[in-house]
Image (spheres, grey):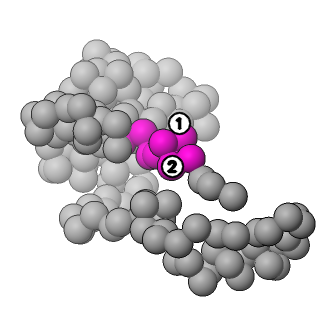
Amino acid sequence: MEVNQDLLKNPWDVIDEIADDETQEKFELDDILVEISLKIINYRIEKGITQKKLAEKLNVSQSMISKLESGEYNPTIEQLWKVSKKLGWTLELQMKKPVETDIWNQLDTEIDFGNEAPSDEEMMNQIAEGA
């Protein structure tokens, strides 16, 4: 059985292949801003409050909440820390080396299942041997 590696690629690999460094960095920053946006939106939804009510709680303008939720605004660490305190959250940052997770490109052997369909256990054993 041959695995079509092109179909299993991580979407970020496509960006890495076709985008220049500046564009890749923009995508990475956008991901962080989207994560912040989603946290704030989900908080508002869970609490059943409007942007205006959240703005009052955080002592900012409603337009600032809108910008945070849309990803249009890039808050500082201090601003995020203040928001997290007012919402009862903790702010944690992680800076770490990337981890290689592309197992399909690491396999150097072809898995042979013969003519019969293997059991799940046989398939897992052969995959484990090739990894």
Q: Which mark is residue 5?
A: 2
Farthest residue toward the top?
A: 63
Rendered position, 50 above or below 94: above
- The residue that appears at 30% across and 26% down in the rendered structure is 71
- The residue that appears at 48% across and 31% down in the rendered structure is 41
Q: Viewer-nearest of labels 1 and 2?
A: 2
Q: Nearer the viewer, residue 37 or 19?
A: 19
Q: Position of residue 130 (x, y in %)?
A: 56, 78
Question: Looking at the image, can residue 32 be seen?
Answer: yes
Using residue 103 as the reference point, say whether residue 128 is left or right of it: right
- The residue that appears at 53% across and 36% down in the rendered structure is 42
- Specify whether residue 5 is painted magenta: yes
Rendered position, 18 above or below 1: above
- Specify whether residue 100 is painted magenta: no
Q: Nearer the viewer, residue 41 or 117?
A: 117
The reply to whether discs 1 and 2 touch (Cβ–Cβ < 8 Å) is: no
Label 1 sits on residue: 42
